[in-house]
Image: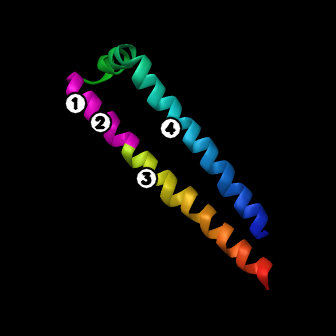
Amino acid sequence: MTIEKLRSFFGWCTVINIAFLLIWMMWLLFAHDFVYSVHGKWINVSVQQFDAIHYTGLLYFKMGIFLTNVVPYIALLIIGKSNDTH
């Protein structure tokens, strides 16, 4: 597999994962009460616990995106540029 294909792969992974992150954030921002009522049927948590759980989940997901998608993408950009100069 070429560096260009890997770079494209990580680029698209980043875009897709950020789209999922934004959808998750939008659901919580604009439909918080609905999402809470749906999840409240499955588990008994307060609104504060629910918010803390989702905020933590968003944080870990965002960190995962950066560590497993963005950083390899940037590394491949750097490698690609260093190969072009030789």
Q: Give the range drawn in magenta.
A: 45-58
Q: Which mark is residue 63?
A: 3
Q: Which of marks 2 and 4 is in front?
A: 4
The outermost residue toward the bottom is 86
Closest to the observer: 24 or 45?
A: 24
Q: Which amino acid does label 4 sit on?
A: Leu
Q: How far apart are marks 4 and 1 (CA)?
A: 20 Å
Of tags 4 and 1, the one toward the viewer is 4
Residue 21 is marked as 4
Q: Is residue 14 above or below residue 22?
A: below
In the picture, measured across the screen, residue 34 lies left or right of residue 51, that is: right
* Quadrant of image for the C terminus: bottom right
Asked whether 55 falls inside the magenta stretch, the response is yes
**Residue at horizontal 75%, vertical 69%?**
3
Cβ–Cβ under 8 Å for marks 2 and 1: yes
> Which residue is identified by label 2?
53
Mark 1 secondary-structure assignment: helix
Disc 2/disc 4 C-alpha distance (Å): 15 Å
> How far apart in space, not on screen, are marks 3 and 4 (Cα)?
11 Å
